[in-house]
Image (spheres, coloured by chain):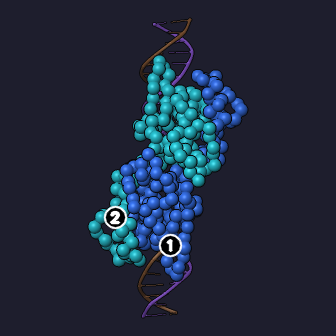
Chain colours: A cyan, B blue, C brown, D purple
Amino acid sequence: MTGTTHEAAELTAGTDSECSARLVDAGKVALVKSQMPRDIDVVELAAIFGLLSDPGRVRILTALLSGEMCVCDVAATTGLSESGVSHALRLLRASRVVEVRRSGRMAYYSLADSHVSILLELGLKHVGHTGQQRLAMADFD
Amino acid sequence: MTGTTHEAAELTAGTDSECSARLVDAGKVALVKSQMPRDIDVVELAAIFGLLSDPGRVRILTALLSGEMCVCDVAATTGLSESGVSHALRLLRASRVVEVRRSGRMAYYSLADSHVSILLELGLKHVGHTGQQRLAMADFD
DNA sequence: TTAACGTATGAACAACTCTACATATATTCT
DNA sequence: AGAATATATGTAGAGTTGTTCATACGTTAA
């Protein structure tokens, strides 16, 4: 998901060195290549999508769309173990997708990244789900 | 990414059996739980995000946002090996995210799933990238 | 036909992920 | 103080993923 190693050999063909004559439409290749996002952005974006690529995390984040919740309530809502929820929230917290508010021994989590929330909502809608809660977001198709 | 096995034990706590008294806000849990998307939709959505969770595939799909391209041009544009591109496109084709048009020995790929395209575009925008090509899509934020 | 070409596929390996269980920490209650 | 509670963390193992290299397939050119 984070892809530290698998990403290693990915940038073999740099910006300049065209090593291969195997091009069908050289003009288009040059144009599109010049419009490609920066490597760092590609990797970051893939990482964000990676955070959303696990059903457990999708459930957790979907639950949090309804607002702040403590760990045990998230577990009860999603059907995941409390340990599993805690691990998942740790990961999401490390990427600043969620944030914690602590009160006594309780930990209340909430969504902290509107970009991720919007991607999730859009995905849920496209997959056929219509939830009641909505973040600020226009209607697509 | 496909998560066949890791997903297995995920639905332990079914719809009815509340095995734990560990609830802080039982009312909210019941409400939010009733609004959760179907398991099948969660798994499908996670799989879709999983397709976007690899930098190589993000590059390939981003290139295809500019329109149909053959395998070798995609490889040249993205800096990936032709074999790698072929493998990735096979995966994306299996999920109907891209489609092929064959002409002689060439294979021209294009985006076939507007949902995925929109998620990708939104992600690219949020990550700071502004490409020239746009699919039909309103402006956010 | 044979050779070259563009693409597709198979297999193997290292790296990574998720889950489960055990344990740790911090807070509250008695 | 000690026990119970809510959450956090460590670790190990099974499973999955992406890459590479080799090879196969279908098409065109000679």
Residue B68 appears in view: yes
Q: Chain of mark 2?
A: A
- Can see residue B91? no
The 10 Å Cα crowd at callout 1, few under 14, some 14 to 19, many 20 or more, is some
The picture places residue A94, in percent across and down from the top left corner, at 41, 37
Which dot, 2 or 1, sits closer to the camera?
2
Which amino acid does the dot numbered 1 rest on? Tyr
Report whether mark 2 lies on the same chain as mark 1.
no
In the picture of the structure, the residue carrying the numbered disc 1 is B108
- Tell me the distance, in whole angstroms, between the alpha carbons under discs 2 and 1: 20 Å
Where's residue A107, x and y in %?
49, 25
Tell me the residue at 44%/39% (across/down): A113
Residue plotted at (63% across, 24% down): B26
Check whether the beta carbons of the residues at disc 2 and disc 1 lie within 8 A of each other. no
From the viewer's perspective, is B35 left or right of A86? right
Q: Is residue B99 above or below residue A51?
A: below
Mark 2 surroundings within 10 Å by alpha-carbon count, few (fewer than 14), some (14 through 19), many (20 or more): few
Q: Secondary structure at mark 2?
A: helix
Q: Give residue D30's position: percent from left, percent from top.
A: 42, 94
Q: Amino acid at mark 2?
A: Ser
Compared across the picture, whether B42 is left or right of A34 comes to: right
- Give me the disc on residue A34: 2
Residue A56: assigned label: none
Helix, strand or loop for disc 1: strand
Residue A17 drawn above or below residue B141: below
